[in-house]
């Protein structure tokens, strides 16, 4: 392990810890765990995610392109593009379990509070330094993955959802060692300040991402 790799791992760990959400930052997940969240809230989660995935996938494609072919950042963002595609394939079973029809999905109007997150990711795709964006996303994924694990467990025990219906959340909750290695390489690529800003903006990006993450869940809770 090189010094730069060790430094990148430390940066990711420190940023993830600093940006970890507080217990009361998310008001919807506890309701799902208690079985008191209405089916409409679960359906809203699916409907908003369909829009988010489409936006994030295009943003990651642009970030991969901006990173330069064959670079560590391009590899990381390319994997995220693949991941969004796989997640979308799993979303349909969850939508069906929520009772959503193709007509309902097509007519749904997304909520601003839920779409602030992908709007900012799109901004990062245009303006952010790829290594810093990789750091911010990786720190945020730690929180998102934890939420998905809790939702997946609660959907089974409280709502009787099948394994297939929970596949979308299982996908994000499960370990992803290859992606983690790619994230370290991407952050390491920007950790030398001789080449631009390094990853100095990563914590700033990540703070906003985590704020928009909480806004997503709480908008659904309020609805």
Image (spheres, rainbow, N blue to C red):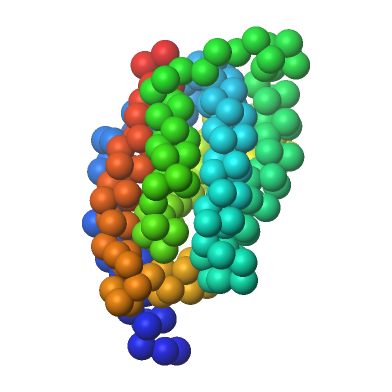
Q: Residue 114 in the image: state x and y as whole percent.
A: 44, 26
The answer, for residue 182, to whether it is visible in the render is no
Name the residue at 28% across, 57% down: 201
Q: Is residue 160 left or right of residue 151?
A: right
Image quadrant for the C terminus? top left
Name the residue at 35% across, 29% down: 215
* Near-viewer residue (140 or 100): 140
Q: Is residue 2 above or below residue 87?
A: below
Image quadrant for the N terminus? bottom left
Q: Is residue 143 above or below residue 194?
A: above
Image quadrant in which you'd find residue 189: bottom left
The answer, for residue 35, to whether it is visible in the render is yes
Q: Residue 121 in the image: state x and y as whole percent.
A: 45, 41
Q: Residue 44 in the image: state x and y as whole percent.
A: 54, 20
Name the residue at 62% across, 35% down: 54
Name the residue at 62% across, 71% down: 70
Q: Residue 53 in the image: state x and y as whole percent.
A: 59, 37
């Amino acid at each position: 392990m090189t010094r730069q790799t060790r430094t990148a791992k430390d940066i990711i760990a420190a940023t993830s810890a600093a940006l970890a959400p507080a217990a009361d930052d998310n008001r919807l997940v506890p309701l799902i765990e208690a079985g008191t969240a209405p089916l409409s809230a679960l359906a809203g989660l699916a409907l908003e995610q369909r829009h988010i995935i489409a936006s994030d996938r295009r943003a990651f494609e642009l970030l991969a392109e901006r990173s330069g072919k064959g670079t560590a950042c391009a590899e990381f963002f390319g994997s995220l593009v693949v991941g969004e595609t796989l997640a979308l394939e799993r979303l349909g079973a969850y939508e069906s379990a929520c009772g959503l029809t193709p007509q309902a999905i097509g007519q749904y109007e997304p909520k601003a509070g839920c779409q602030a997150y992908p709007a900012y990711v799109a901004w990062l795709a245009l303006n952010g330094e790829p290594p810093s964006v990789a750091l911010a996303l990786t720190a945020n994924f730690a929180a998102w993955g934890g939420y998905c694990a809790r939702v997946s467990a609660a959907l089974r025990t409280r709502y009787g959802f099948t394994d297939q219906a929970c596949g979308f959340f299982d996908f994000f909750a499960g370990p992803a060692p290859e992606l983690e290695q790619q994230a370290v390489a991407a952050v390491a690529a920007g950790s030398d300040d001789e080449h631009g800003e390094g990853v100095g903006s990563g914590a700033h990006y990540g703070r906003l991402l985590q704020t928009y993450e909480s806004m997503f869940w709480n908008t659904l809770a309020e609805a």
